[in-house]
Image (spheres, rainbow, N blue to C red):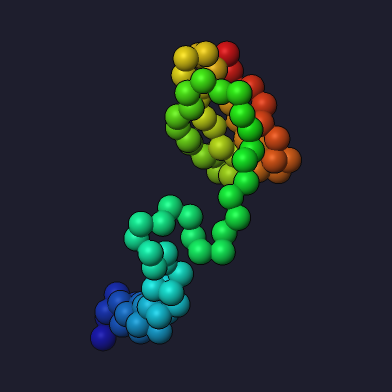
Amino acid sequence: MTRQNSFLAVAGIVLVLLLPTLLSAQIIDQKAIVAKGAQVEKLGDGYSFTEGPAVDREGNVYFTDQPNNKIFKWSAGTGKITLFTD
């Protein structure tokens, strides 16, 4: 058995063992947009029309307030929203 075949066999076994856990982590109600038990929290307001979002490696979230030509940043570290660029 080659090294690649050994790796594939082990990966297959791990996948079979983890599959029940992976499936149970999925949202069961396909119509729901928020996972059961999750709490929705309003982080900000006063924007005209937001879109995005984009996330960086640190978990910070960037989104635009398009009519006002601004990009905001939600900081994963502080939870605060600041103007990123205008």
Position in image of residue 3 (x %, y %): 32, 78
Q: Quadrant of residue 46?
A: top right
Image quadrant where one finds the N terminus: bottom left
Left or right side of 46 for 79:
right
Q: Where residue 65 sits in the image (x, y, percent)?
A: 51, 22
Query: Can I make out residue 14 in this image?
Result: no
- Left/right placement of residue 83 relative to residue 23 reads right
Q: Residue 42 at what x, y percent from top left?
A: 62, 40
Q: Residue at x 46, y 69 (%)?
A: 25
Q: Position of residue 66 (x, y in %)?
A: 46, 19
Q: Is residue 58 above or below residue 50?
A: below
In this orientation, does residue 67 appear?
yes
Considering the image in quadrants, where does the C terminus appear? Answer: top right
- Which residue is rendered at x = 35% and y = 57% of the image? 31
Q: Is residue 49 left or right of residue 41?
A: left
User: In the picture, residue 26 is in which quadrant?
Assistant: bottom left
Residue with the most extreme right position:
78
Please say if 49 is above or below 69: below
